[in-house]
Amino acid sequence: DDRLLTEPLRHPDFFNVKELFTLKDLFDARVHLGHKKGCRHRFMEPYIFGCRLDHDIIDLDQTMQHLQLALNFTAHVAYRGGIILFVSRKRQFCHLIESTARACGEYAHTRFWQGGLLTNAHVQFGPGARLPDLLVFLSTLNNVFEPHVAIRDAAKVNIPTVGVVDTNCNPCLITYPIPGNDDSPSAVELYCKLFRMTIIRAKDRRRQSEAVEELR
Amino acid sequence: TLRLICTTTAVQRKNVGASGPEKYTEAFIKKQIEEFNLGKRHLANMMGEDPETFTQEDIDRAIAYLFPSGLFDQQARPVMKHPTEIFPEQRKIQWGEDGRPFHFLFYTGKQSYYSLMHETYEKLLNVQKHQDQLMDEDLPLQKEKRNLAGSRWLTKIELEEMLLEKVSDDDYSRFIQLLQKLVALPCADIEEKYIQKFSKEVPVQLQKVLIEPLQYDERGVAFSTGEGKRKTASATAVVYDNGTGKITVNGIDILHYFPVLQDREQLLFPFQFLGRIGKHDMVCTVSGGGRSAQAGAIRLASAKALRSFVTEKEVEFMRQAGLLTVDPRVKERKKPGQEGPRRKFTWKKR
Protein backbone atom coordinates (compact mmCIF):
# COMPACT_ATOMS: atom_id res chain seq x y z
CA ASP A 1 0.00 0.00 0.00
CA ASP A 2 2.88 2.33 0.83
CA ARG A 3 4.49 1.26 -2.45
CA LEU A 4 1.38 2.36 -4.35
CA LEU A 5 1.54 5.84 -2.85
CA THR A 6 5.29 6.51 -2.97
CA GLU A 7 6.05 5.00 -6.41
CA PRO A 8 4.45 7.83 -8.53
CA LEU A 9 6.20 10.54 -6.47
CA ARG A 10 9.66 9.39 -7.69
CA HIS A 11 9.03 10.36 -11.32
CA PRO A 12 8.68 13.99 -12.47
CA ASP A 13 5.92 13.09 -14.97
CA PHE A 14 4.55 9.72 -13.87
CA PHE A 15 1.26 10.11 -15.78
CA ASN A 16 2.85 11.56 -18.94
CA VAL A 17 0.61 14.61 -19.09
CA LYS A 18 2.94 16.34 -21.58
CA GLU A 19 1.56 14.34 -24.48
CA LEU A 20 -2.05 15.54 -23.87
CA PHE A 21 -1.52 19.00 -25.35
CA THR A 22 0.81 20.86 -27.75
CA LEU A 23 1.55 24.56 -28.22
CA LYS A 24 -0.42 24.48 -31.45
CA ASP A 25 -3.50 23.12 -29.61
CA LEU A 26 -3.29 26.00 -27.14
CA PHE A 27 -2.93 28.53 -29.94
CA ASP A 28 -5.86 27.09 -31.93
CA ALA A 29 -8.06 27.22 -28.85
CA ARG A 30 -7.18 30.96 -28.45
CA VAL A 31 -5.67 30.45 -24.99
CA HIS A 32 -3.11 33.20 -25.65
CA LEU A 33 -5.71 35.99 -25.95
CA GLY A 34 -5.89 38.27 -22.93
CA HIS A 35 -7.96 41.33 -22.09
CA LYS A 36 -7.19 44.95 -23.00
CA LYS A 37 -4.22 46.86 -21.57
CA GLY A 38 -6.42 48.83 -19.16
CA CYS A 39 -7.70 45.61 -17.52
CA ARG A 40 -4.24 44.25 -16.89
CA HIS A 41 -3.46 43.15 -13.32
CA ARG A 42 -0.02 44.13 -12.00
CA PHE A 43 0.90 40.61 -10.90
CA MET A 44 0.13 39.13 -14.32
CA GLU A 45 2.88 41.14 -16.06
CA PRO A 46 5.50 38.34 -15.80
CA TYR A 47 3.17 35.99 -17.68
CA ILE A 48 2.33 38.38 -20.53
CA PHE A 49 4.30 38.00 -23.78
CA GLY A 50 3.40 41.42 -25.17
CA CYS A 51 0.71 43.85 -26.15
CA ARG A 52 -0.60 44.38 -29.69
CA LEU A 53 -3.03 47.24 -30.43
CA ASP A 54 -3.92 47.39 -26.72
CA HIS A 55 -4.66 43.62 -26.56
CA ASP A 56 -2.52 41.56 -24.15
CA ILE A 57 -0.98 38.30 -25.44
CA ILE A 58 -0.14 35.63 -22.86
CA ASP A 59 3.23 33.83 -23.14
CA LEU A 60 2.31 30.30 -24.24
CA ASP A 61 5.73 28.84 -23.29
CA GLN A 62 5.11 29.75 -19.66
CA THR A 63 1.51 28.52 -20.00
CA MET A 64 2.81 25.15 -21.22
CA GLN A 65 5.05 24.77 -18.16
CA HIS A 66 2.39 25.85 -15.68
CA LEU A 67 -0.23 23.66 -17.34
CA GLN A 68 2.05 20.65 -17.20
CA LEU A 69 2.71 21.20 -13.47
CA ALA A 70 -0.97 21.71 -12.72
CA LEU A 71 -2.14 18.64 -14.67
CA ASN A 72 0.58 16.54 -13.02
CA PHE A 73 -0.61 17.71 -9.61
CA THR A 74 -4.29 16.96 -10.35
CA ALA A 75 -3.32 13.53 -11.66
CA HIS A 76 -1.47 12.75 -8.40
CA VAL A 77 -4.42 13.97 -6.32
CA ALA A 78 -6.86 11.86 -8.35
CA TYR A 79 -4.51 8.85 -8.10
CA ARG A 80 -4.61 9.11 -4.29
CA GLY A 81 -8.43 9.24 -4.32
CA GLY A 82 -8.78 12.91 -3.48
CA ILE A 83 -11.95 14.97 -3.92
CA ILE A 84 -11.59 17.51 -6.76
CA LEU A 85 -14.03 20.43 -6.92
CA PHE A 86 -14.39 22.41 -10.16
CA VAL A 87 -15.32 26.03 -9.50
CA SER A 88 -16.33 28.72 -11.96
CA ARG A 89 -18.76 31.57 -11.90
CA LYS A 90 -19.14 31.98 -15.66
CA ARG A 91 -22.73 31.36 -16.63
CA GLN A 92 -21.82 30.40 -20.21
CA PHE A 93 -19.79 27.37 -19.17
CA CYS A 94 -21.73 26.29 -16.06
CA HIS A 95 -23.41 23.36 -17.84
CA LEU A 96 -20.20 22.24 -19.59
CA ILE A 97 -18.19 22.21 -16.35
CA GLU A 98 -20.89 20.32 -14.44
CA SER A 99 -21.06 17.68 -17.20
CA THR A 100 -17.24 17.38 -17.19
CA ALA A 101 -17.22 16.89 -13.42
CA ARG A 102 -19.92 14.25 -13.65
CA ALA A 103 -18.02 12.44 -16.42
CA CYS A 104 -14.86 12.31 -14.25
CA GLY A 105 -16.70 11.19 -11.14
CA GLU A 106 -15.62 14.39 -9.35
CA TYR A 107 -17.58 17.39 -8.06
CA ALA A 108 -18.52 20.84 -9.37
CA HIS A 109 -19.74 24.12 -7.94
CA THR A 110 -20.68 26.67 -10.60
CA ARG A 111 -23.47 28.36 -8.63
CA PHE A 112 -23.70 31.02 -5.96
CA TRP A 113 -21.00 30.36 -3.35
CA GLN A 114 -22.46 30.40 0.17
CA GLY A 115 -20.08 32.03 2.65
CA GLY A 116 -19.45 29.19 5.07
CA LEU A 117 -19.02 26.28 2.64
CA LEU A 118 -15.37 25.55 3.39
CA THR A 119 -14.86 27.43 6.65
CA ASN A 120 -18.17 26.41 8.29
CA ALA A 121 -18.58 22.94 6.78
CA HIS A 122 -19.52 21.20 10.06
CA VAL A 123 -22.58 23.43 10.37
CA GLN A 124 -23.48 23.51 6.66
CA PHE A 125 -23.22 19.81 5.85
CA GLY A 126 -23.19 18.04 9.20
CA PRO A 127 -20.50 16.49 11.39
CA GLY A 128 -18.10 14.19 9.58
CA ALA A 129 -18.30 15.88 6.17
CA ARG A 130 -15.11 15.61 4.08
CA LEU A 131 -13.83 18.77 2.41
CA PRO A 132 -12.43 18.79 -1.15
CA ASP A 133 -8.70 18.02 -1.48
CA LEU A 134 -8.22 20.20 -4.58
CA LEU A 135 -10.06 23.18 -6.02
CA VAL A 136 -9.83 23.72 -9.79
CA PHE A 137 -10.84 27.20 -10.92
CA LEU A 138 -11.79 27.54 -14.58
CA SER A 139 -12.41 31.24 -13.95
CA THR A 140 -10.96 32.99 -10.89
CA LEU A 141 -13.29 35.99 -11.03
CA ASN A 142 -16.95 36.07 -10.01
CA ASN A 143 -19.77 37.91 -11.77
CA VAL A 144 -18.71 41.29 -10.30
CA PHE A 145 -15.10 40.95 -11.58
CA GLU A 146 -13.71 40.41 -8.09
CA PRO A 147 -11.56 37.47 -6.97
CA HIS A 148 -13.69 34.45 -6.08
CA VAL A 149 -14.22 33.96 -2.33
CA ALA A 150 -13.19 30.30 -2.65
CA ILE A 151 -9.52 31.24 -3.34
CA ARG A 152 -9.21 32.97 0.02
CA ASP A 153 -11.25 30.27 1.82
CA ALA A 154 -9.16 27.44 0.37
CA ALA A 155 -5.99 29.22 1.50
CA LYS A 156 -7.52 29.55 4.98
CA VAL A 157 -8.41 25.84 5.20
CA ASN A 158 -5.09 24.64 3.62
CA ILE A 159 -6.60 23.26 0.40
CA PRO A 160 -4.31 23.50 -2.67
CA THR A 161 -5.75 25.35 -5.68
CA VAL A 162 -5.26 25.09 -9.44
CA GLY A 163 -6.64 28.03 -11.42
CA VAL A 164 -6.79 29.50 -14.90
CA VAL A 165 -5.76 33.14 -14.43
CA ASP A 166 -6.58 35.68 -17.13
CA THR A 167 -4.81 39.05 -17.55
CA ASN A 168 -7.28 40.78 -15.20
CA CYS A 169 -7.00 38.20 -12.38
CA ASN A 170 -4.87 38.08 -9.22
CA PRO A 171 -2.65 34.95 -9.26
CA CYS A 172 -1.40 35.46 -5.69
CA LEU A 173 -3.15 32.89 -3.51
CA ILE A 174 -3.39 30.15 -6.15
CA THR A 175 -0.87 27.30 -5.70
CA TYR A 176 -0.73 26.27 -9.38
CA PRO A 177 -1.82 29.20 -11.57
CA ILE A 178 -2.27 28.61 -15.32
CA PRO A 179 -2.00 31.90 -17.20
CA GLY A 180 -4.52 31.65 -20.07
CA ASN A 181 -7.79 32.83 -21.55
CA ASP A 182 -10.91 32.01 -19.50
CA ASP A 183 -13.52 33.76 -21.65
CA SER A 184 -13.50 31.93 -25.00
CA PRO A 185 -15.64 28.79 -25.33
CA SER A 186 -12.88 26.98 -27.27
CA ALA A 187 -10.33 27.63 -24.49
CA VAL A 188 -12.66 26.45 -21.71
CA GLU A 189 -13.61 23.34 -23.72
CA LEU A 190 -9.90 22.56 -24.11
CA TYR A 191 -9.30 22.91 -20.37
CA CYS A 192 -12.28 20.70 -19.56
CA LYS A 193 -11.05 18.06 -22.00
CA LEU A 194 -7.53 18.12 -20.52
CA PHE A 195 -8.69 17.87 -16.90
CA ARG A 196 -11.13 15.10 -17.76
CA MET A 197 -8.47 13.08 -19.55
CA THR A 198 -5.90 13.49 -16.74
CA ILE A 199 -8.33 12.51 -14.00
CA ILE A 200 -9.64 9.48 -15.87
CA ARG A 201 -6.09 8.43 -16.72
CA ALA A 202 -4.97 8.76 -13.09
CA LYS A 203 -7.95 6.77 -11.79
CA ASP A 204 -7.42 3.99 -14.36
CA ARG A 205 -3.72 3.85 -13.41
CA ARG A 206 -4.71 3.52 -9.75
CA ARG A 207 -7.10 0.67 -10.48
CA GLN A 208 -4.42 -1.10 -12.54
CA SER A 209 -1.82 -0.73 -9.77
CA GLU A 210 -4.26 -2.04 -7.16
CA ALA A 211 -5.11 -5.03 -9.37
CA VAL A 212 -1.38 -5.74 -9.82
CA GLU A 213 -0.83 -5.55 -6.04
CA GLU A 214 -3.77 -7.92 -5.41
CA LEU A 215 -2.31 -10.48 -7.79
CA ARG A 216 0.95 -10.54 -5.80
CA THR B 1 -9.02 20.16 14.15
CA LEU B 2 -7.25 23.30 15.33
CA ARG B 3 -6.36 23.56 19.01
CA LEU B 4 -7.41 26.83 20.58
CA ILE B 5 -4.93 28.52 22.94
CA CYS B 6 -5.73 31.16 25.61
CA THR B 7 -9.53 30.88 25.30
CA THR B 8 -12.23 29.89 27.74
CA THR B 9 -13.44 26.30 27.96
CA ALA B 10 -16.88 27.50 26.88
CA VAL B 11 -15.65 27.75 23.27
CA GLN B 12 -14.24 24.22 23.32
CA ARG B 13 -17.44 22.62 24.57
CA LYS B 14 -19.18 20.99 21.61
CA ASN B 15 -22.45 22.66 20.67
CA VAL B 16 -24.60 19.57 20.11
CA GLY B 17 -27.67 21.56 19.12
CA ALA B 18 -25.92 23.47 16.34
CA SER B 19 -24.97 20.32 14.41
CA GLY B 20 -28.63 19.76 13.44
CA PRO B 21 -30.72 16.59 13.71
CA GLU B 22 -29.04 13.18 13.41
CA LYS B 23 -28.48 11.75 9.97
CA TYR B 24 -29.14 8.06 9.41
CA THR B 25 -27.11 5.75 7.13
CA GLU B 26 -28.72 3.34 4.66
CA ALA B 27 -27.47 0.32 6.63
CA PHE B 28 -29.11 1.64 9.79
CA ILE B 29 -32.48 2.06 8.06
CA LYS B 30 -32.23 -1.46 6.60
CA LYS B 31 -31.51 -2.92 10.03
CA GLN B 32 -34.52 -1.07 11.44
CA ILE B 33 -36.76 -2.51 8.71
CA GLU B 34 -35.57 -6.06 9.45
CA GLU B 35 -36.17 -5.58 13.18
CA PHE B 36 -39.64 -4.20 12.43
CA ASN B 37 -40.60 -7.23 10.32
CA LEU B 38 -39.33 -9.67 12.98
CA GLY B 39 -41.18 -7.75 15.69
CA LYS B 40 -44.36 -7.86 13.61
CA ARG B 41 -44.21 -11.66 13.43
CA HIS B 42 -43.53 -11.96 17.19
CA LEU B 43 -46.50 -9.69 17.90
CA ALA B 44 -48.76 -11.78 15.65
CA ASN B 45 -47.67 -14.92 17.54
CA MET B 46 -48.34 -13.25 20.88
CA MET B 47 -51.86 -12.22 19.84
CA GLY B 48 -52.55 -15.67 18.43
CA GLU B 49 -53.02 -14.39 14.85
CA ASP B 50 -51.51 -15.54 11.55
CA PRO B 51 -48.08 -13.82 11.04
CA GLU B 52 -48.50 -13.75 7.25
CA THR B 53 -51.74 -11.72 7.19
CA PHE B 54 -50.98 -9.26 10.01
CA THR B 55 -51.84 -5.73 8.75
CA GLN B 56 -50.88 -2.31 10.16
CA GLU B 57 -54.36 -1.91 11.72
CA ASP B 58 -53.92 -5.21 13.59
CA ILE B 59 -50.53 -3.97 14.84
CA ASP B 60 -52.10 -0.73 16.10
CA ARG B 61 -54.87 -2.62 17.89
CA ALA B 62 -52.40 -5.06 19.42
CA ILE B 63 -50.14 -2.27 20.72
CA ALA B 64 -53.13 -0.37 22.14
CA TYR B 65 -54.17 -3.60 23.93
CA LEU B 66 -50.72 -4.54 25.26
CA PHE B 67 -49.63 -1.01 26.24
CA PRO B 68 -52.74 0.92 27.33
CA SER B 69 -51.94 4.57 27.82
CA GLY B 70 -54.09 7.36 29.23
CA LEU B 71 -52.11 10.15 27.55
CA PHE B 72 -54.19 12.70 25.68
CA ASP B 73 -51.69 13.44 22.91
CA GLN B 74 -52.03 10.65 20.32
CA GLN B 75 -48.43 11.15 19.15
CA ALA B 76 -47.09 10.55 22.69
CA ARG B 77 -48.57 7.03 22.91
CA PRO B 78 -46.50 3.91 22.07
CA VAL B 79 -46.41 3.36 18.32
CA MET B 80 -45.08 0.56 16.09
CA LYS B 81 -44.86 1.66 12.47
CA HIS B 82 -42.69 0.93 9.45
CA PRO B 83 -39.30 2.75 9.77
CA THR B 84 -39.90 4.76 6.59
CA GLU B 85 -42.79 6.50 8.36
CA ILE B 86 -40.88 7.15 11.57
CA PHE B 87 -37.48 8.26 10.29
CA PRO B 88 -38.03 11.33 8.09
CA GLU B 89 -36.73 11.18 4.55
CA GLN B 90 -33.55 12.98 3.49
CA ARG B 91 -31.97 12.44 6.86
CA LYS B 92 -29.66 9.75 5.46
CA ILE B 93 -26.00 10.68 5.29
CA GLN B 94 -25.02 11.89 1.83
CA TRP B 95 -21.54 10.36 1.67
CA GLY B 96 -20.07 6.87 1.62
CA GLU B 97 -17.60 5.17 3.94
CA ASP B 98 -14.53 6.81 2.41
CA GLY B 99 -16.11 10.24 2.85
CA ARG B 100 -16.79 10.93 -0.83
CA PRO B 101 -20.32 12.36 -1.34
CA PHE B 102 -22.70 10.46 -3.65
CA HIS B 103 -24.07 13.42 -5.62
CA PHE B 104 -21.73 15.41 -7.89
CA LEU B 105 -23.30 18.72 -6.81
CA PHE B 106 -23.11 17.96 -3.09
CA TYR B 107 -20.76 20.88 -2.34
CA THR B 108 -23.24 23.48 -3.65
CA GLY B 109 -25.48 22.94 -0.62
CA LYS B 110 -28.74 22.61 -2.61
CA GLN B 111 -27.91 19.49 -4.61
CA SER B 112 -31.41 18.44 -5.73
CA TYR B 113 -32.43 21.95 -6.83
CA TYR B 114 -29.24 22.57 -8.79
CA SER B 115 -29.30 19.11 -10.39
CA LEU B 116 -32.89 19.86 -11.48
CA MET B 117 -31.72 23.14 -13.05
CA HIS B 118 -28.86 21.28 -14.73
CA GLU B 119 -31.23 18.68 -16.24
CA THR B 120 -33.73 21.29 -17.41
CA TYR B 121 -30.95 23.29 -19.08
CA GLU B 122 -29.76 20.10 -20.77
CA LYS B 123 -33.27 19.54 -22.19
CA LEU B 124 -33.23 23.15 -23.44
CA LEU B 125 -29.92 22.57 -25.23
CA ASN B 126 -31.29 19.35 -26.75
CA VAL B 127 -34.32 21.19 -28.11
CA GLN B 128 -32.11 23.92 -29.57
CA LYS B 129 -29.86 21.33 -31.23
CA HIS B 130 -32.92 19.59 -32.72
CA GLN B 131 -34.20 22.94 -33.96
CA ASP B 132 -30.84 23.66 -35.62
CA GLN B 133 -30.92 20.25 -37.32
CA LEU B 134 -34.39 20.91 -38.70
CA MET B 135 -33.35 24.35 -39.89
CA ASP B 136 -30.32 22.83 -41.68
CA GLU B 137 -32.60 20.42 -43.53
CA ASP B 138 -35.03 23.28 -44.25
CA LEU B 139 -37.91 21.37 -42.70
CA PRO B 140 -40.80 23.37 -41.18
CA LEU B 141 -40.69 23.70 -37.40
CA GLN B 142 -43.68 22.23 -35.54
CA LYS B 143 -45.92 24.91 -34.16
CA GLU B 144 -48.70 23.10 -32.27
CA LYS B 145 -49.83 25.48 -29.57
CA ARG B 146 -49.63 23.90 -26.14
CA ASN B 147 -52.82 24.39 -24.14
CA LEU B 148 -51.61 26.84 -21.49
CA ALA B 149 -55.07 27.71 -20.17
CA GLY B 150 -55.83 24.34 -18.63
CA SER B 151 -52.53 23.75 -16.83
CA ARG B 152 -50.47 25.45 -14.14
CA TRP B 153 -46.88 24.97 -12.92
CA LEU B 154 -46.09 23.28 -9.57
CA THR B 155 -46.31 25.58 -6.54
CA LYS B 156 -43.26 26.27 -4.36
CA ILE B 157 -44.51 23.89 -1.64
CA GLU B 158 -45.06 21.08 -4.13
CA LEU B 159 -41.54 21.62 -5.51
CA GLU B 160 -40.12 21.49 -1.97
CA GLU B 161 -41.92 18.19 -1.41
CA MET B 162 -40.55 16.84 -4.67
CA LEU B 163 -36.95 17.85 -3.93
CA LEU B 164 -37.05 17.16 -0.16
CA GLU B 165 -35.14 20.34 0.59
CA LYS B 166 -35.96 24.00 1.12
CA VAL B 167 -36.37 26.16 -2.00
CA SER B 168 -36.24 29.95 -1.72
CA ASP B 169 -38.59 32.29 -3.61
CA ASP B 170 -35.81 33.49 -5.96
CA ASP B 171 -34.77 29.93 -6.81
CA TYR B 172 -38.38 28.94 -7.46
CA SER B 173 -39.01 31.89 -9.78
CA ARG B 174 -35.78 31.16 -11.69
CA PHE B 175 -36.84 27.55 -12.18
CA ILE B 176 -40.28 28.60 -13.47
CA GLN B 177 -38.66 31.11 -15.85
CA LEU B 178 -36.40 28.38 -17.21
CA LEU B 179 -39.41 26.08 -17.76
CA GLN B 180 -41.31 28.84 -19.54
CA LYS B 181 -38.28 29.48 -21.76
CA LEU B 182 -38.18 25.76 -22.61
CA VAL B 183 -41.89 25.69 -23.42
CA ALA B 184 -41.67 28.81 -25.59
CA LEU B 185 -39.34 27.12 -28.12
CA PRO B 186 -41.10 25.69 -31.22
CA CYS B 187 -39.65 22.17 -30.95
CA ALA B 188 -40.49 21.74 -27.26
CA ASP B 189 -42.78 18.79 -28.10
CA ILE B 190 -39.75 16.47 -27.85
CA GLU B 191 -39.46 17.08 -24.10
CA GLU B 192 -43.22 16.94 -23.47
CA LYS B 193 -42.89 14.08 -20.98
CA TYR B 194 -40.30 15.97 -18.91
CA ILE B 195 -42.42 19.15 -18.85
CA GLN B 196 -45.51 17.22 -17.76
CA LYS B 197 -43.72 16.27 -14.54
CA PHE B 198 -43.89 19.93 -13.51
CA SER B 199 -47.34 20.96 -14.79
CA LYS B 200 -50.75 20.19 -13.32
CA GLU B 201 -54.22 20.23 -14.80
CA VAL B 202 -56.55 22.96 -13.57
CA PRO B 203 -60.22 21.92 -13.67
CA VAL B 204 -62.20 24.60 -15.44
CA GLN B 205 -64.89 25.88 -13.09
CA LEU B 206 -68.12 26.92 -14.71
CA GLN B 207 -69.62 29.85 -12.88
CA LYS B 208 -72.93 29.66 -14.74
CA VAL B 209 -76.03 29.45 -12.63
CA LEU B 210 -78.54 26.94 -14.00
CA ILE B 211 -81.90 28.45 -14.84
CA GLU B 212 -84.62 25.92 -13.92
CA PRO B 213 -87.10 25.01 -16.66
CA LEU B 214 -90.84 25.85 -16.35
CA GLN B 215 -93.05 23.38 -14.51
CA TYR B 216 -96.73 22.78 -15.39
CA ASP B 217 -99.52 22.17 -12.82
CA GLU B 218 -102.80 20.14 -13.30
CA ARG B 219 -104.63 22.91 -15.20
CA GLY B 220 -101.72 23.22 -17.72
CA VAL B 221 -100.61 26.60 -16.40
CA ALA B 222 -96.83 27.20 -16.38
CA PHE B 223 -95.29 28.21 -13.06
CA SER B 224 -91.87 28.48 -11.41
CA THR B 225 -90.56 28.91 -7.85
CA GLY B 226 -87.90 31.15 -6.38
CA GLU B 227 -86.38 31.76 -2.92
CA GLY B 228 -85.04 34.98 -1.46
CA LYS B 229 -83.54 36.33 1.77
CA ARG B 230 -83.11 39.84 3.19
CA LYS B 231 -81.79 40.60 6.69
CA THR B 232 -83.57 37.92 8.77
CA ALA B 233 -86.56 37.39 6.46
CA SER B 234 -86.78 34.40 4.08
CA ALA B 235 -89.44 34.05 1.38
CA THR B 236 -90.54 31.55 -1.29
CA ALA B 237 -92.54 32.75 -4.31
CA VAL B 238 -94.51 30.76 -6.94
CA VAL B 239 -95.18 32.77 -10.13
CA TYR B 240 -98.01 31.49 -12.42
CA ASP B 241 -98.38 32.34 -16.10
CA ASN B 242 -101.60 33.62 -17.74
CA GLY B 243 -102.60 35.59 -14.70
CA THR B 244 -104.27 38.86 -13.87
CA GLY B 245 -101.61 40.35 -11.59
CA LYS B 246 -103.02 39.04 -8.28
CA ILE B 247 -100.40 38.70 -5.52
CA THR B 248 -101.06 36.76 -2.29
CA VAL B 249 -98.67 36.74 0.72
CA ASN B 250 -99.16 34.06 3.42
CA GLY B 251 -102.75 33.68 2.19
CA ILE B 252 -103.44 37.45 2.56
CA ASP B 253 -103.73 39.92 -0.33
CA ILE B 254 -100.84 42.39 -0.55
CA LEU B 255 -103.09 45.43 0.02
CA HIS B 256 -103.90 44.08 3.48
CA TYR B 257 -100.48 42.54 4.26
CA PHE B 258 -98.39 45.55 3.17
CA PRO B 259 -100.38 48.77 3.99
CA VAL B 260 -97.35 50.92 3.08
CA LEU B 261 -97.00 51.88 -0.62
CA GLN B 262 -93.16 51.51 -0.53
CA ASP B 263 -93.35 47.76 0.22
CA ARG B 264 -95.90 47.15 -2.55
CA GLU B 265 -93.67 49.03 -5.00
CA GLN B 266 -90.77 46.75 -4.02
CA LEU B 267 -92.91 43.67 -4.80
CA LEU B 268 -93.99 44.99 -8.19
CA PHE B 269 -90.55 46.21 -9.30
CA PRO B 270 -89.42 42.94 -11.03
CA PHE B 271 -92.66 42.78 -13.05
CA GLN B 272 -92.49 46.48 -13.90
CA PHE B 273 -88.86 46.11 -15.05
CA LEU B 274 -89.80 43.29 -17.44
CA GLY B 275 -93.06 44.94 -18.49
CA ARG B 276 -95.22 42.01 -17.34
CA ILE B 277 -97.39 43.66 -14.67
CA GLY B 278 -100.80 42.20 -15.49
CA LYS B 279 -99.55 38.92 -16.98
CA HIS B 280 -98.48 36.87 -13.90
CA ASP B 281 -100.08 35.67 -10.66
CA MET B 282 -97.99 35.20 -7.55
CA VAL B 283 -98.42 33.19 -4.33
CA CYS B 284 -95.72 33.69 -1.68
CA THR B 285 -94.88 32.63 1.87
CA VAL B 286 -92.60 34.77 4.04
CA SER B 287 -91.35 34.57 7.65
CA GLY B 288 -88.94 36.46 9.89
CA GLY B 289 -87.60 39.99 9.66
CA GLY B 290 -89.59 43.19 9.59
CA ARG B 291 -91.89 44.91 7.11
CA SER B 292 -89.21 46.17 4.76
CA ALA B 293 -87.06 43.00 5.04
CA GLN B 294 -90.00 40.77 4.07
CA ALA B 295 -90.74 42.99 1.07
CA GLY B 296 -87.10 42.77 -0.10
CA ALA B 297 -87.06 38.97 0.38
CA ILE B 298 -90.20 38.51 -1.72
CA ARG B 299 -88.78 40.82 -4.42
CA LEU B 300 -85.63 38.67 -4.72
CA ALA B 301 -87.70 35.44 -4.72
CA SER B 302 -90.01 36.67 -7.48
CA ALA B 303 -87.09 37.91 -9.61
CA LYS B 304 -85.43 34.47 -9.34
CA ALA B 305 -88.70 32.79 -10.32
CA LEU B 306 -89.18 35.09 -13.33
CA ARG B 307 -85.78 34.00 -14.79
CA SER B 308 -87.46 30.86 -16.21
CA PHE B 309 -90.05 32.90 -18.14
CA VAL B 310 -87.62 35.29 -19.73
CA THR B 311 -84.78 35.30 -22.38
CA GLU B 312 -81.08 35.19 -21.40
CA LYS B 313 -80.55 38.79 -22.43
CA GLU B 314 -83.30 39.97 -20.09
CA VAL B 315 -81.81 37.81 -17.29
CA GLU B 316 -78.52 39.70 -17.84
CA PHE B 317 -80.47 43.03 -17.67
CA MET B 318 -82.09 41.93 -14.41
CA ARG B 319 -78.69 40.97 -12.99
CA GLN B 320 -77.23 44.37 -13.93
CA ALA B 321 -80.24 46.12 -12.38
CA GLY B 322 -79.43 44.34 -9.11
CA LEU B 323 -82.65 42.35 -8.97
CA LEU B 324 -80.87 38.99 -8.65
CA THR B 325 -78.22 39.98 -6.07
CA VAL B 326 -78.68 39.03 -2.42
CA ASP B 327 -78.50 42.20 -0.30
CA PRO B 328 -75.55 41.58 2.07
CA ARG B 329 -76.46 44.34 4.57
CA VAL B 330 -77.24 42.99 8.05
CA LYS B 331 -77.39 44.63 11.46
CA GLU B 332 -73.87 45.51 12.65
CA ARG B 333 -72.92 44.36 16.15
CA LYS B 334 -72.47 46.71 19.08
CA LYS B 335 -68.84 47.12 20.21
CA PRO B 336 -67.63 47.44 23.82
CA GLY B 337 -66.67 50.97 24.81
CA GLN B 338 -69.23 52.40 22.41
CA GLU B 339 -72.95 52.96 22.74
CA GLY B 340 -73.89 51.38 19.41
CA PRO B 341 -72.15 49.93 16.33
CA ARG B 342 -70.75 53.35 15.40
CA ARG B 343 -72.04 55.83 18.02
CA LYS B 344 -69.49 56.58 20.75
CA PHE B 345 -70.35 57.73 24.27
CA THR B 346 -70.80 61.47 24.78
CA TRP B 347 -67.42 63.15 25.14
CA LYS B 348 -67.20 65.40 28.18
CA LYS B 349 -64.43 67.95 28.33
CA ARG B 350 -64.17 67.78 32.12
Image (cartoon, coloured by chain):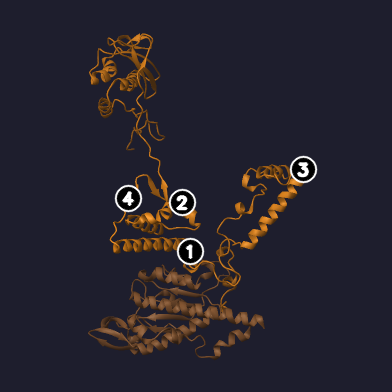
Chain represented in orange: B
Look at label 1 and name its amino acid: Gln
Q: In the rendered image, which residue does mark 1 sit on?
A: B111
Query: What color was chain A assigned in the picture?
Result: brown
User: Residue at left 68%, top 53%?
Assistant: B36
Q: In the rendered image, which residue does mark 2 sit on?
A: B158
| Nearer to us in this view, B20 or B280 | B280
| B242 relative to B323, above or below | above
Which chain does the residue under circle 2 lie in? B
Q: Which comes sooner in the sequence, label 4 or label 3?
A: 3
| The N terminus of chain A lies in quadrant | bottom right
Asked if labels 1 and 3 touch by Cβ distance under 8 angstroms, the answer is no
Corner quadrant of residue A4: bottom right
CA gap between label 2 and label 1 equals: 17 Å
Q: In the rendered image, which residue does mark 4 sit on?
A: B144
Label 1 environment density (alpha carbons within 10 Å; few <14, some 14–19, many ≥20): some
Q: Which comes sooner in the sequence, label 2 or label 3?
A: 3
Q: Which comes sooner in the sequence, label 1 or label 4?
A: 1
User: Residue at left 36%, top 78%?
Assistant: A187
Front: mark 1 or 4: 4
Is the same chain shared between marks 4 and 3? Answer: yes
Residue B94's spot in the image, x, y percent? 55, 65
Corner quadrant of residue B53: top right
Front: mark 4 or 3: 4
Local SS, label 1? helix
